[in-house]
Image: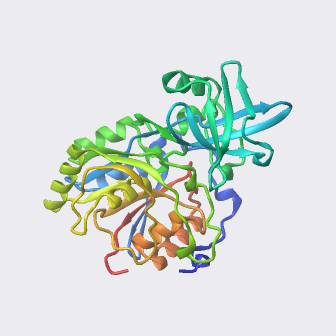
Amino acid sequence: MRVDQFDFSLAPDCIAERPASPRDSARLLHVQGSALSDRMIRDLPSVLKAGDVLVFNDTRVIPARLLGKRGETSIEILLHRQEDGGVWQAMARPAKRLKSGDQINFAVDLTAEVLGRTDDGSVRLQFNCAGMPFSEALVRHGHMPLPPYMGRVDDHHDRTDYQTVYAQRDGAVAAPTAGLHFTKQLLADLKSRGIENVFVTLHVGLGTFQPVKVEDTEDHVMHFEWGEITPAVAEKLTAARGEGRRLVAVGTTSLRLLESASDENGAIKPFAAETNLFIVPGYRFKAVDILMTNFHLPRSTLFMLVSAFSGQDCMRQAYSHAMEQGYRFYSYGDACLLELDQLK
């Protein structure tokens, strides 16, 4: 499909620079085919049904942006893929000045040696520490990797704001943003209404920020991200589907993982691997019935995904409505609740 089919214009003042406070005071556009309903995130317990199962991504964002020096040259590093023994793949600026053997100094207790480059242009870095010492050094010296379209540097508020309240497993370099809207009280309210939740893990990678630069979707190479669905969770989700209960993916990351782990009959299998599933219109969804997600960038793989889920015409109508009604877009913005269109 031509990528320009997924283009649209968005005024800069539609982009949220800060999240709603409290989190569940953000707006929610409920999309049921051509029917659009303006709601709030805190309305979810009344919008969903008893027996529905919310699937959350419990990845935790690491402060993956590092600022250092190679000699007198300032270097910005964005970690995105961990190897073994303190080795990471990262995007670097300016990358052309780095060569094998160079040392980058981030702090007295945090340095890295350049090992070389990968095929995608990343640099491979050998840090002077690994494991818990490295994680602790990141907390001291790293910055939260805010999306570039926010147009600002991170501050101490982002350490909390750009993290879900249920984050558990370190590894993401971008937040699963639909989950940012949930509070502990909202989770309790959902549970009291008989709406269950389960947790899966997909460590969100840099590809979520990368624009699609090709003209046809068939030529786009999707990034790999590591995910896990435990045997107990897979069994619970498959049983729920067998009982006719709806699976509600909180975020495109949860959806992509569930679809990656599902067989043709919709049974969800245990999963612990990388996935680069790229969903465009024409894809047949096997496991997910409802998707809660934020509003996405034009020409992005995420807008292609929601167009596949609810139909291209439907999503254009929904996004036009959201812009007209002043919804806030992107990572810190509002959300929509999409019901699968089986006839799209």
Tell me what residue is drawn at x 37 percent, y 51 percent: 43
Q: Quick one: which residue is furthest to the right in this view? A: 72
Quick check: 58 above or below 212?
A: above
Quick check: 56 above or below 136?
A: below
* Residue 237 in view of the camera: yes
Q: Quick one: which residue is furthest to the top in this view? A: 108
| The C terminus sits in image quarter | bottom left
In the image, 278 versus 95, the foreground residue is: 95
Residue 141 in which image quadrant: top right
- Classify residue 17 as left or right of residue 45: right
Colour scheme of the picture: rainbow
Measured from the top left, where is residue 210 in percent x and y? Answer: 62, 58
Measured from the top left, where is residue 311 in percent x and y? Answer: 43, 76
- Classify residue 10 as left or right of residue 321: right
Tally of numbered tags: 0
- Classify residue 163 as left or right of residue 32: right
- Classify residue 297 as left or right of residue 183: right
Residue 35 in which image quadrant: bottom left
Measured from the top left, where is residue 183 in percent x and y? Answer: 41, 38
* Residue 251 in view of the camera: no
Measured from the top left, where is residue 267 in percent x and y? Answer: 21, 61
Residue 240 in which image quadrant: bottom left
Quick check: 114 above or below 118?
A: above
In the image, 278 versus 325, the foreground residue is: 278
